[in-house]
Amino acid sequence: MKRLLQNRLVLQLALTLIAAASLAGISIVVITDAIRGAESVVLNDTSKTLSAALRELRREQQERTSSDSGWPTLPAAARDLSLRALSYTVLSSFPGVEGGFYNRHDQFLGYSYPTHDTGSLKTDIPSAERPAIAALAQRTVQQQQPVQTVLRGKIDLVVLSAVPGALPGSAIWVMKRLPGRAQHTDRAFLPLLVLIAAALCSILGALAIGLKLEAQLRREARLRSLGRLAAGLAHEIRNPLNSIRLTVQLLEHRLRSGRLAPDDFATIRAEVDRLSTLLNDLLDLQRTRQPQPKSQPVAPVLEHCLALLDRQAQLSGVRLSLDIPDRSISAAFDAHQLTQALMNLLLNALEASPPGSTVTLSVRRHKSDVTLEVEDRGPGLNHEQQEHLFEPFYTTKPAGTGLGLAVSRELIRSQGGDLSYQPGSAGARFILQLPT
């Protein structure tokens, strides 16, 4: 997670991709609801039209059969012809509606489709829908109540409605075809899906470019850091070597004049020690010793560090303060490496603090970690200093090597923790996080 948070550009692009996918999903849901809503409106209007047609057909059938006492004795062909004339007259007022009658003997009678687009008289019941019409009419006869159903084909929607007829064991049925309605959803989704796919491809392309750019920026940052490391190392080594060279020349002169004394070698020893310290600090950056963290109280380590620096604090006129609400607070850490990191932070705080001020070491317990805060009342750090604070050989002290903070952070991170600078305080405040 920390590595992901550090890659801010990648995170921003990933969030953009998630937002685009979410927007696409919401768009699909909204458009689906809109299409279904529009379909519902069309089906509702069609249902009203078919109901009106059925009422007219039943009323006309009632009048025809009741006014003709010989109706039951008429041949089937005569009844079919008479009912067809009736349905043709009624359905002429309902564009796109076709229908007829059905009796208990599985006979279709009086079918017509007066508004059929061919212009010729259509008397054959649609073969594709015939089984569904028969099943619907049979249900109506059995249940003696209106029945409606919707057939969804590959292209069209077909709405079927039936009501009990005026004669016992009969039904009246009508249907209306809604061309292209079954494919309406697919056609509406296709442009949307194309646009969504194009947007996602664009974002993925931007993400790939961002990853490549991130890698290039990291590579350039490493090269810049390496250049600063090399320049700082050359500077730190050159100064002691120049001092040693001048001292050796002085010793050669005194040796010829016979005035050589043992103290004349003190400068060489001091500069050699300085070079040794520098090399040791460099080695600490890549120290091979693995940390051995274990859960233990932090108070003993903090008190040990403060005791080691007590004398130096007195000489500087600075007070050391420990703020720990509970001595039982524990964390997982390597005691030796934590001591080394804390000593670096406390020494920096002492050197930056004016006489009469206080350096405070605070402990705070949180849900997932324990934080140690080292705060002084010195001049603090400006924005530029904060940018390069943990880089090797970057220092604001004339006699510093610029490796203390870099080493300290590496020591803490190797244990699963972190070391950071907290801006906004009067002086400088460093926060050291330890896992629990």
Image (cartoon, grey):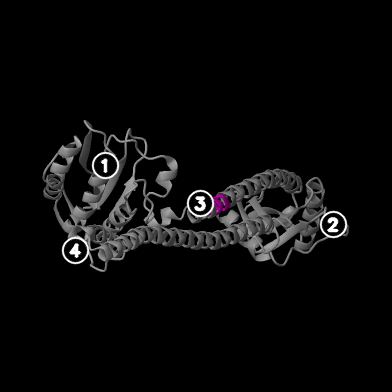
Q: Residue furthest top?
A: 356
Kindly state the secondary structure of the residue where label 4 is placed.
loop
Give the spatial CA distance, label 3 vs label 4.
Answer: 36 Å
**According to the image, label 2 marks what residue?**
117
**According to the image, label 1 marks what residue?**
351
**Is residue 19 located in the magenta-colored stretch of the structure?**
yes
Looking at the rendered structure, the kind of residue marked 1 is Glu
- Residue 323 percent location from the top left of the image: 17, 38
In this rendering, does residue 227 appear at all? yes
**Magenta part of the protein: which range?**
18-25
Mark 1: few/some/many CA within 10 Å (<14, 14-19, 20+):
some
Of marks 1 and 2, which one's residue comes earlier in the chain? 2
Looking at the rendered structure, the kind of residue marked 3 is Gln
Q: Nearer the viewer, residue 132 or 282?
A: 282
Looking at the rendered structure, the kind of residue marked 4 is Gln
Mark in front: 4 vs 1: 1
Residue at left 23%, top 67%? 289
Mark in front: 2 vs 4: 4
Q: Nearer the viewer, residue 228 or 432?
A: 228
Kindly state the secondary structure of the residue where label 2 is placed.
loop
- Residue 246 percent location from the top left of the image: 34, 60
